[in-house]
Amino acid sequence: MTIGLNDLTLIYPQHLCLDISNQEQETVWQETMQESYSNTSARWNAYLNHLSLNAFLNWLQEDPDLQVMPRLCFPKVELPSIWELVNGSLLTLGETRLALIPSDKSSFSEFRIPQEWIDIPSWSAHYYLAVQLNLEECWLRISGYTNYQQIQEQAIYDPTDRTYCLDAEYLIADLNVMWVAQELYPSKIPEIKSLATLSKAQAEQLLEQLNKWTFSSPRLNVPFDVWGAFLAGDEFRQHLYQRRLKNQNNNQVEASYVGSNLSLWFQNIFSMGWQNLDTLLSPQQKTLAVQFRSDLGLNEGYVKRAKLIDLGMEVGGSAVVLLIGLKTEVDGKIGLRVQLHPANGEPYLIHNLKLILLSQTGAILQEVISRSHDNYIQLKKFKSSPGIRFSIQVALDNVSIKEDFLLEALDD
């Protein structure tokens, strides 16, 4: 159903609804294209954040009763290094800090805030604004706001993508309430536990590790206390950003990185990012583990691991869970099962999502494509011998993420 700005203001009279014309979208897109990002997902994330900031700041500055001018909390030149890695923006009005978290999903049932904006002390805000964009209909809607205390008390933490999730019904719709409340009863940010301080040597070691993930943000691939401390350091973050750009320009990753050695899984040694399936389940996906085991017969003899794959902000339902099970067959080869599931409580995979098995030379060996109401897709069971490399690719339109694997013969 098409909903224009006029209809939107009638349906949601308490929400702030703003026009973002085609001309404005084109101007902001050209601005974003002048900035450097390592992949299309990061660029789209930056584009949505630029649109949100521009529209909201313009609206604030048109208010004749505005007492103080809004200011960005990060220098403008540093914003690409943030949007390369995480979604969201932070600004101040006097002593009040506001975080804008944009999304272009068509439905809005919960407000998902990246953990960085909550648990990094220097990044936290007094208020968090849920921004929904509809680029086709040329509007932006602030669906409401919440404060730091409410997030701590009512939000549910989702470890699959490290977000705090607050049901939309708990948001306060009218921004005027926020202005009045802040004037009469100023919101406070409770004291946040300090993150560890990284030495230069620790930061350099982590930088090498994080630099291996070039096609998606590495934010989920190290423990948060370490990631948060690294990200909060402007110098460290800039170094990672520059290295990711260099890798993108060279169109290659470090030669030493050959992907996950699946043979080590039999010794309970797993590459970064591969987790027990239960740790990637949201409350709405309690049946996922059971379904994976029963559908594929993975209860007997299989080693199983799952990884969150982030396709980026331009894709609705942007995160998916890649599940792999393997076991030694009677002929000495390794039998493999591969599935792809939605994440973040989404009931279905996005339409036309591809799950592809690639040979060492890049040839397509198998390919399955999701339909409108698929709650998972899977490759046919296949076998591989020690010494073989292959890849699993998840793709949608111009967004593609590839995981490389090696089966290596192990000493007895």
Image (cartoon, helix red, strand yellow):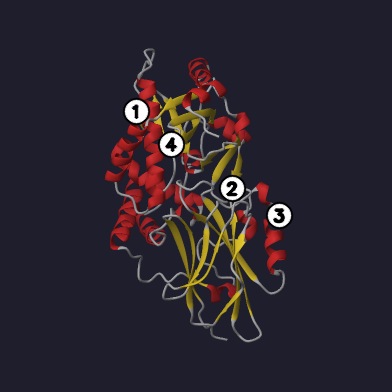
The tag earlier along the polypeptide, 4 or 3, is 4
For the C terminus, the image quarter is bottom right
Q: Disc 4 and disc 2: Cα gap in Å?
A: 23 Å
Image marks 3 and 1: residues in contact by CB distance under 8 Å: no
Dot 2 surroundings within 10 Å: few (below 14), some, or many (20 or more)? Answer: many
Q: Secondary structure at mark 1?
A: strand
Q: Residue at x 71, y 60 (%)?
A: 290
Q: Amino acid at mark 2?
A: Asn
Q: Disc 4 and disc 3: Cα gap in Å?
A: 35 Å
The tag earlier along the polypeptide, 4 or 2, is 4
Residue bearing mark 4:
135
Q: Secondary structure at mark 4?
A: loop
Residue bearing mark 2:
344
Q: Is residue 84 visible?
A: no
Q: Amino acid at mark 3?
A: Thr
The answer to which quarter of the image holds residue 10 is top right
Residue bearing mark 3:
287
Q: Residue at x 34, y 21 (%)?
A: 69
Left or right of 59 in this view: 116:
right
Q: Secondary structure at mark 3?
A: loop
The answer to which quarter of the image holds residue 21 is top left
Residue bearing mark 1:
71
Given this view, does label 4 or label 2 mark the residue nearer the observer? 4
